[in-house]
Amino acid sequence: MNRILEKQVLSDVTKLMVVEAPHIARKAQAGQFVIVRIGEHSERIPLTIADFDREAGTITLIFQQVGKSTEEMATLEVGDCFATVVGPLGRPTEIERYGTVVCVGGGVGIAPIYPIARALKEAGNTVISIIGARTQAYLFWEDRMRAVSDELIICTDDGSYGRKALVTEPLKELLEARSSEIARIWAIGPTIMMKFVSLTTKPFNVPTIVSLNTIMVDGTGMCGGCRVELTSGQRFVCVDGPEFDGHQVNWDNLLARVQFYR
């Protein structure tokens, strides 16, 4: 059983949990995810690992309450246990010394972009981070992102904090001014955000990596529920991803599939 050691309320719909999972923490790398079950007969919930502590044997999960299962998960308190936590799953982020990179996190996507930005910084890259949310209440981990970034740009849709803009606006400005310097871009957030980040970067031919959060059942490639269409063919997010070249993703097909299961 995987015990909850810490719980934080980040917003009215966003929760953080630090979970005891020594075997997962020992092997986890940036970009990977786990699948949790609250009870023996509960739905399997895929969640990207927001942080991990190998010495403490813990992983940090951040999620939004968007349906029955995550609403139920939000009722768990410190001392409660998940029935199962399986992972780490998926291919880790390809961390190299690229030069100057940009990490874009939108909404709850700030959580999984953090370990990627941290790993890129540790590898010697110059990291420019852009984080955004609908309003200030849904922003979190500004301090953590600032600590692993050479430059941090904060946006809110309503202008309640930072710059009033979508994350694509400062990203486009960076590319217009410094496209020859920027070696690679990572973007994690709502599907529609990742689509428009990819459309923004494509004219500049800067490699853009997105982390997809599709419908997922088993996490081993057996069910096919997480398949995604790329220009190079179909792939499964659980075993081939979750990271893909954003310029290859069939975004209209992916958005339609995400809406179908709502």
Image (cartoon, rainbow, N blue to C red):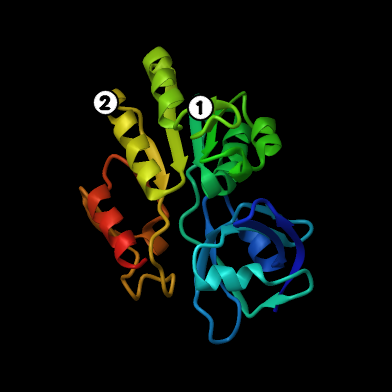
Residue 164, disc: 1
Residue 53, disc: none
| Gap in angstroms between the C-alphas marked 2 and 1 | 24 Å
Helix, strand or loop under label 1: strand
Q: Decide which of 3, 235 is in the foreground and name it.
A: 3
**Which badge, 2 or 1, comes first in the chain's sequence?**
1
Amino acid bearing label 1? Lys
Q: Residue at x 60, y 83 (%)?
A: 39
Q: Position of residue 205 (x, y in %)?
A: 30, 27
Whether label 2 touches label 1, CB < 8 Å: no
Sort mark 2 into few (<14), some (14-19) or many (20+) by Cα contacts within 10 Å.
Answer: few
Q: Is 215 located above or below residue 203 in the figure?
A: below
Q: Decide which of 219, 61 is in the foreground and name it.
A: 61
Q: Position of residue 5 (x, y in %)?
A: 78, 65
Sort mark 1 into few (<14), some (14-19) or many (20+) by Cα contacts within 10 Å.
Answer: some
Amino acid bearing label 2? Pro
Q: Residue at x 64, y 35 (%)?
A: 145
Is 73 placed left or right of 224 in the picture? right
Q: Decide which of 141, 32 is in the foreground and name it.
A: 141
Q: Which residue is mark 2?
A: 203
Q: Position of residue 8 (x, y in %)?
A: 73, 56
Pick the quarter of the image with the N terminus: bottom right
